[in-house]
Amino acid sequence: MFDLLIKNGKLISGEKIEVAVKDGVILAAETEIESSAKEILDLEGKHYLSAGWIDDHVHCYEKMTLYYDYPDEIGVTKGVTTVIDAGTTGAENIGDFYELTKSVKTNVYALVNISKWGIVEQDELADLTKIQADLVRNRLTELPQFIVGIKARMSKTVVGENGITPLELAKDIQQKNQNLPLMIHIGSAPPELQEVLELLDEGDVLTHCFNGKPNGILDRETDQIKDFAKVAYEKGIVFDIGHGTDSFNFHVAERALKEGIKATSISTDIYHRNRENGPVYDLATTMEKLRVVGYSWEEILDKVTAVPAKYFYLEKKGQLVKGYDADLTIFDLEVGEKTLTDSNGFTRTAKELIKPVKTIIGGTIYDN
């Protein structure tokens, strides 16, 4: 007997799907499943079902003062089953962060900031003595179940006078630790974006890929994507949205799409202020923005499930497949009108709205 049987759901393609769960694991995902279960959830053909949504760039260590939130406020209550905190903490405080996550419903993982205290100040990489490779390695050894990569923020306000040096140190740490996933934040220069991209390898994650800043991927004079950005994209560098308060621009995303460049993954860079006051609000709103830009719902869902699971090695998440974790998102697509605002105050009107209905984590159902 199954613990949970989800009946009469539908995939985004419209195909019927039913899912059976036992002990927090998917045991079957088929068009029809005839079996008994302790709990049956009948979606009556009305609701869509996908693998659980993954937001691979959030800030949810509640003890911080600059950027913080609470995992369940940006996770389970928003249709998101898994979040990856993107470098809020460093080697000195990531252990405390891990202890806090044990009491929440949402699955939480973390990227360890190469600066040992994380983002306690805006310029955490201005002092190179805070980058201690041995400390990072120790934490990676102690918390392999929690730390899924490393993070470095490469913009003028963060690195001070250090230019490209923190990224060189981050790449060295990465290479000496089994080439763990590396996420790089980009913003104002120096360092110049071209310098940053030249140091990145296939599989490295460039977050804030569609920001509207002069040091971004769009040449403001020609209104074309910069050639070196195209080279980086073709090389296999992961272009991650990382919307945030100041890092997503509709026009940049639209120009990129016209030139054949799509975001590889979709994430929010959410924390309490841009959740409460916008322009981010939640992952669903960021997904709606990519739909307005011109992405299909099928690829949008892939970019918040299978894709982040692949690049951060979450081997049992991101797909409706036998043996995978029973993390699922049940949602509706509705016709309506909603004004969406990017990080620079520009707006678009969404005509298709995505609304999470239930979040299932480890086989446990939570209402949205």
Image: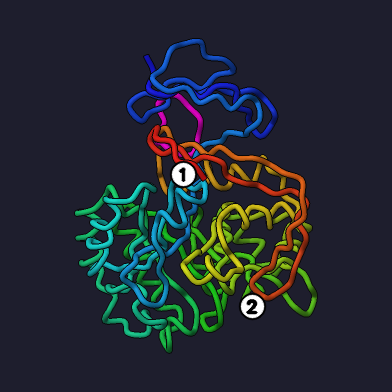
Q: Secondary structure at mark 2?
A: loop
Q: Residue furthest bottom?
A: 161
The amino acid marked with disc number 1 is: Ala
What residue is shown at x 65% (from left), y 25% (from top)?
45
Q: Position of residue 193 (x, y in %)?
A: 57, 74
Nearer to the camera, 301 or 217: 301
Instruction: Find the magenta span and give its range.
Output: 316-324
Q: Looking at the image, how many numbered discs can be counted on the residues?
A: 2
| Quarter of the rendering containing residue 162 | bottom left
Nearer to the camera, 256 or 105: 105
Q: Which of the colour schemes (rainbow, by chain, secondary structure, one colour) is used?
A: rainbow
**Mark 1 Cα-neighbour bin, 10 Å: few <14, some 14–19, many ≥20:** many
Dots 2, 1 in contact, CB < 8 A: no
Which residue has dot 1 on it? 309
Residue 326 placement, left or right of 351: left
The amino acid marked with disc number 2 is: Lys
Q: Position of residue 138 (x, y in %)?
A: 19, 60
Alpha-carbon span between mark 2 and mark 1: 29 Å
Nearer to the camera, 85 or 261: 85
**Mark 2 Cα-neighbour bin, 10 Å: few <14, some 14–19, many ≥20:** many
Q: Position of residue 64 (x, y in %)?
A: 34, 73
Residue 95 placement, left or right of 277: left
Q: Secondary structure at mark 1?
A: helix
Residue 363 placement, left or right of 229: left
Q: From the viewer's perspective, is residue 295 above or below residue 23?
A: below
Q: Which mark is residue 213?
A: 2
What residue is shown at x 54% (from left), y 57% (from top)?
267
| Quarter of the rendering containing residue 1 | top left
Q: From the viewer's perspective, is residue 12 above or below residue 84?
A: above
Nearer to the camera, 335 or 325: 335
Q: From the viewer's perspective, is residue 364 above or below residue 301?
A: above
